[in-house]
Amino acid sequence: MAVAQGEADMKWKLLSTGVLSANALMLALAPTPSFAQDGASSEDIIVTARRREESAQDVPASLSVVGADEAQARGANRVRDLEAATPNVLFTGSENNSLTRVTVRGLESQARQNVGTESGLGVYVDGVIQGRLTSFNQEIPDLDRVEFLRGPQGTLYGRNSIMGAINVITRQPDLDEAHFELNGRIAELGERTGSFYGSTPLGDSAAASLSLFSIQRDGYIHNVATGNDIGTDDTQGGRLKFLLEPGGSWRITLAADALRDDSVGTNSRRTVGAFSTPDPYTTNVDVEPLSRRDVGGLSATVEVDVLGGHQLTSISAYRWANNDRRTDSDGTPTVSQITTQVSDQEQFSQEFRLASPTGGRWDYVLGAYFYDQTIYGRTDGQIIGLGSASIFGNIETTSIAAYGNLDFHITDQLTLNAGIRFTDEDKDLSYQQTGIVGFVPFIAPGHDSQSDNDVSPTIGLRYEPTDDLMFYITAARGYRSGGWNVEPQTSAVITNFGQLRFDSESLLSTEAGAKTQWFDGRLQVNGSIFQIEYDDLQVATRVPLPPPFAPGLFASVVTNAAAAEARGAELEFRASPTEDFNFGGVFGWVDTEYTDYVQPGAPPLVFTGNELNGAPDFTAGAFAEYTFALGSMGSLTARGDYRHVSTYFTERTNDTRMEIPETDVFNARLTYLSADGHIRAALFANNVTDEEILVSRVTNAAGTIQSVDYARPRVAGIELGFRY
């Protein structure tokens, strides 16, 4: 252990020193620029990551931004398709859209698909939180940009944004002119996707926009038992927005969105034993999985200038997210055990925010927030011939918060930033479970309540010696509320009501970084180092199920690890040497460890010193594109993308049988654009080398039952688009 710790310390010193010194080295190189003088400057991207408009390069935090054009160049249909554009961010778990989990800087967003847990990642669309995993992997047909914020964001975002936030901003209707876009894609494995976006003025002070999309893919996993292909994607939806500017400084945006997903999910493949299959894209189950979801909502955003240049914003929103899932839990072609899971969620949120004018000695944002959620979950674990064990849970959550964030400009170059958020949250659980008489213990129906009061502060310094250089250091506290185990088959391992509960978790994060621009903005280099200390970390514990459950099956029970830590470094760069040539990349390193984690028992289980679940040491991404001018015929752009993810474990035991191997994925694209910009056509291939990408791996203690799940193999196709 001492040797391993010494190696980790040396790696930390080398990487952190390298990231911090990279920009200093650029200072020495600045007098002798090597880029062509007619090169194109990088675009100054305006973001709202700190609840006000500002340049992304002025935000003193780790922030990656992907705009609509970049998302299209990457062939992205959903937010998950953009993970290669940001360091230390990984979408984990299966390909099922309703089971999207995200790891940020080594911490998983949610322990399980469990109505009793909260996500540690805040996902927002136009300022409205998406409360459950079902809504995380957002479709983006009307995208303006996506902002990936890494590190605790509780001060300005709240709602358990302990590990970061994904801020999705959709396009606003255009008050000046009408325009529309139509895009379609046909590819291997039966992929047919299409999207429409249109915007039109409605008189002088109003406009409307409509976006529609359809994503359809045939199954890529062959079920030997039934002869069918599973792992399909069948999702349709849209968004309608109205923009009103009735006069003065009033600006009102009304929005409604909905989607329906009727996909057939994936089912893990056994790799050993009588029912194993050799091909990674096969399974052998008698009951095929389902993965359905209905997601939607309504929102009203009102903005007005008050008090001499202050901007007052109100965001009112109602949302719902319903999910139905079915899984062949035993993973065999014999009729044995089936698990079905239903969750229905509703939420209402109201936020008031006051942002001061900028340009003075003080800049500040003040806000108040109210959130009310009701979520119902039911899980049935059916054992053929014996009956079923069922769990019912209904949770009511009410959260009230007040927050403030202040920038005090000590000098023109030095700024002190301080923020604080006060949160009061109450939860009530109504719970019932039934068991198979004589086999599975059950708990009598009951009620439980939890109350959490939290104060999450942040403080930092920002130093800007020039317009193109910014250095910052911050410290912030993060918080995630506690919950209950309302999870498949926990009735087999939880025998009293008190065992359902787990506590809140917290962390302290410190970060130092730099944001720089060189050669008249043709090169951007940003870097950061960070240290995170976790207390009472929520961890999903896998507990073997007793008979009559099939051998090798586990229940997942969320508990609190005593302590854990993560430290790492991140580097991002983007270069435009000429108007025709662009390239860039991201690199992330994180070292995670349970520093004090012993589970009581006979004997006790010791996980101290192990890595955290779902936490690869390294993530990296790179792209390069070159545009060939074709005169009056338009242009042709060749682009390549690369993504690397190192090995990581899916379980706290760090058992190598539950290790996900490293992956290296290459994508390629050739895009034609007409001279007037109206017509676009592209040929593409994703996963060019046909890498077998393992995304889930589970084994029993004896290793006699192992199940794995793979992402889609290589896909090539064509895209067509028309814009007017």
Image: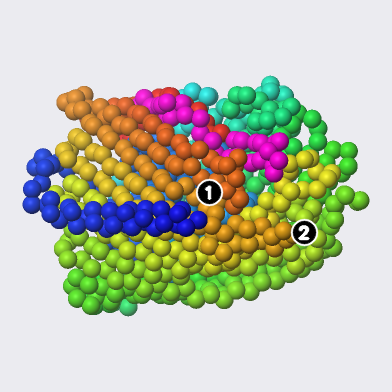
User: Quarter of the image containing the C terminus?
Assistant: top left
Residue 500 located left or right of residue 257: right
How crowded is the residue under tag 1: few (<14 C-alpha within 10 Å), some, or many (20+)?
many
Q: Is residue 700 magenta?
A: yes
Say which residue appears at 53% left-offset and 49% top-offset: 614
Q: Is residue 21 magenta?
A: no
Q: Nearer the viewer, residue 646 or 666?
A: 646
Amino acid beneath label 2 = Ile
Q: Which mark is residue 494?
A: 2
Q: Which mark is residue 614?
A: 1
Residue 283 located left or right of residue 551: left
Amino acid beneath label 1 = Gly
* Helix, strand or loop under label 1: loop
Q: Is residue 473 visible?
A: yes
Say which residue appears at 63% left-offset and 62% top-offset: 598
N-terminal-most mark, 2 or 1: 2
Work out whether 352 lies above or below 695: below
Q: Is residue 368 visible?
A: no
Start and end of the magenta stretch? 682-709
Query: Farthest residue in the right direction?
Result: 438
What is the x, y in percent for residue 199?
A: 38, 44
Tell me the quarter of the picture where residue 585 sits.
Answer: top left
Report the colour scheme.
Answer: rainbow
What is the x, y in percent for residue 584?
A: 28, 42
Say which residue appears at 29% left-offset and 57% top-offset: 17
How crowded is the residue under tag 2: few (<14 C-alpha within 10 Å), some, or many (20+)?
some
Between the C-alphas of marks 2 and 1, the distance is 25 Å
* Helix, strand or loop under label 2: loop
What is the x, y in percent for residue 526?
A: 28, 54
Q: Nearer the viewer, residue 187 or 668?
A: 668
Say which residue appears at 81% left-offset and 32% top-offset: 335
Q: Are marks 2 and 1 in contact (CB under 8 Å)?
A: no
